[in-house]
Amino acid sequence: MYCTVLFDLDGTLTDPKEGITKSVAYALAYFGIVVEDTDTLIPFIGPPLVDSFMERYGFPREKALEAVEKYREYFAPTGIFENKVYLGIPEMLAKLQEKGITLALATSKPEVFAKKITAKFGLDQYLAEQCGSELNGDRIKKADVIEECLKRIGAKKEETVMIGDKSHDVLGAKAAGVASIAVRWGYALPGELEKAAPDAIAEDIAALYRMLTE
């Protein structure tokens, strides 16, 4: 049983599909790119936005940074709360907390936004710490977020596991030297998790709970 469990936010604790895809579409529209089907923007869920704008639309870095600013124009007041908690997550967090396991948030999302989301849905009561990226672009790599989170709570790497739904969660955990468990209910592409090779893959919340407590 792990002493410390770090959770990703988007696609792991909450389903942010509506808010994120609408925010990305808003940003792209500023550059004259019209997206009719926002489901095509689902790959933006999880990874750092700057990287996604560069990789998926060929934006140079400066343009990608500008796109992130436009994204936030919609996301900050509206898209942030076009979100919902996955069924069973609060109950699982409560039971893990009752067992004395330290729970924390480690997300590539800006920390200020992440904290508003967890507070909105009452998830903050289960989290000993919440760590994310900075609005100025600092600490966007998952490994850096994990390292910062471990530093804040004083956790040992060998007693820590990272829970996430995307390959960058798994790869970030490996780079930071902690174990990882990937979850199926998020937004990984077919074969993405297998390629990243986490320590385990949880098919559902019940399976994840068993992995963390047995």
Image (tube, rainbow, N blue to C red):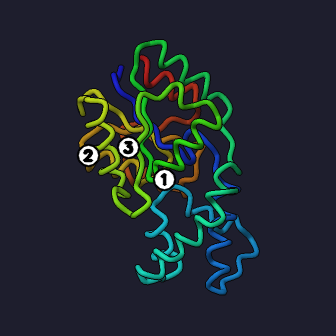
Whether the residues at callouts 2 and 3 have beta carbons within 8 Å, the answer is no
Local packing at callout 1 (Cα closer than 10 Å; few below 14, some 14-19, many 20+) is many
Q: Label 3 belongs to which residue?
A: 198
Q: CA distance from mark 3 to mark 1?
A: 21 Å
Please report whichever mark, 2 or 1, sits nearer to the chain's N-terminal start: 1
Figure quadrant of residue 33? bottom right
Figure quadrant of residue 77? bottom right
Label of residue 168 in the image: none
Please report whichever mark, 2 or 3, sits nearer to the chain's N-terminal start: 2
Q: Amino acid at mark 2?
A: Ala
User: Which residue is painted at 42% across and 48% down in the image?
Assistant: 132
Disc 1, SS: strand
Of tags 2 and 3, the one toward the viewer is 2
Q: Label 1 belongs to which residue?
A: 109
User: Which residue is painted at 44% across and 12% down in the image?
Assistant: 99
User: Is residue 26 depicted above or below 127 in this figure?
Assistant: below
Q: Where's residue 172, x and y in %?
A: 33, 50
Q: Amino acid at mark 1?
A: Lys
Q: Where's residue 126, x and y in %?
A: 51, 25
User: Is residue 56 depicted above or below 148 in this figure?
Assistant: below
Disc 3, SS: loop
Q: Label 2 belongs to which residue?
A: 176
Q: In this view, which residue lies farthest toward the right?
A: 36
User: Which residue is painted at 23% across and 29% down in the image?
Assistant: 156
Q: CA distance from mark 2 to mark 3?
A: 13 Å
Of tags 3 and 1, the one toward the viewer is 1
Please report whichever mark, 3 or 1, sits nearer to the chain's N-terminal start: 1
Q: Where's residue 208, x and y in %?
A: 50, 29
Image quarter of the C terminus: top left
Q: CA distance from mark 2 to mark 1?
A: 18 Å
Q: In this view, which residue lies farthest toward the bottom?
A: 32
Of tags 2 and 1, the one toward the viewer is 1
